[in-house]
């Protein structure tokens, strides 16, 4: 695995080392020792799957309120997304900045998103599956969200959403 820092401390791009032969290919998706050695310790406690039927489906921007904040490793296992993290840590030098990258089944890339970040994505293709590995068990009642197009963030989404849940559409702008 190759780890590439983004402009936001705590958000890291993870690219695979692919071994190919006449059978196809093999890649390790997560190894706690590799993550720790690269300075990004991450131990998943839960794995979740988001299935998305249509391109231009937007999910986000979600986060868990402290002290239940969670880190997650996100990858597209089918199709493609533009994946975004926004720094909501008030004491961070990159507070309210965002970073985004394309994750696809083809490129195998993942985004490691640390605690204190809002997360969201827009699907770039129909029939896109997104796999989340999360460092803590889900605890109902702590989920929060902020508006996907909050002008304070200035996220440059590559597409305009066509499908968005009522909940995600109703999130307020960030007030921190």
Image: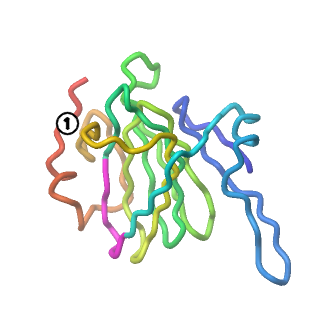
Left or right: 31, with 64 as reference point:
right
- Which residue is pictured at 36% across the width and 70% down the height? 52
For disc 1, the neighbor class at 10 Å (few under 14, some 14 to 19, many from 20) is: some
Highlighted magenta segment, given as a residue range: 52-60
Q: Kindly tell me whether residue 97 is visible in this rendering.
A: no
Q: Residue furthest bottom?
A: 22
Number of numbered discs present?
1
Residue at left 24%, top 67%?
A: 162
**Residue 33: % across, % down:** 75, 40
Q: Which residue is mark 1?
A: 173
4 left or right of 128? right
Residue 56 counted in the magenta span? yes
Q: Which colour scheme appears in the figure?
A: rainbow
On the image, the x and y values in percent for residue 94 come to 45, 25
User: Compared to 66, does 53 lie above or below?
Assistant: below
Where residue 39 appears, x then y in whole percent?
69, 31
The front one of 43 and 169 is 43
């Amino acid at each position: 695995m190759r780890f590439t820092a983004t402009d936001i401390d705590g958000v890291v791009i993870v690219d695979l080392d692919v071994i190919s032969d006449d059978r196809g290919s093999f890649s390790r998706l997560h190894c706690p020792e590799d993550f720790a050695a690269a300075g990004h310790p991450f131990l998943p406690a839960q794995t979740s799957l988001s299935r998305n039927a249509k391109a231009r489906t937007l999910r986000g921007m979600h986060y868990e309120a402290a002290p239940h904040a969670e880190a997650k490793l996100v990858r597209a296992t089918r199709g493609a997304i533009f994946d975004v993290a926004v720094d909501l840590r008030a004491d961070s030098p990159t507070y309210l900045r965002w970073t985004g990258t394309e994750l696809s089944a083809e490129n195998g890339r993942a985004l490691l998103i640390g605690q204190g970040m809002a997360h969201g994505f827009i699907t770039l293709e129909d029939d896109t599956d997104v796999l989340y590995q999360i460092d803590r068990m889900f605890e109902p009642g702590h989920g929060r969200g902020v508006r996907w197009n909050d002008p304070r963030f200035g996220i440059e989404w590559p597409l305009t959403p066509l499908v968005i849940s009522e909940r995600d559409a109703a999130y307020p702008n960030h007030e921190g």
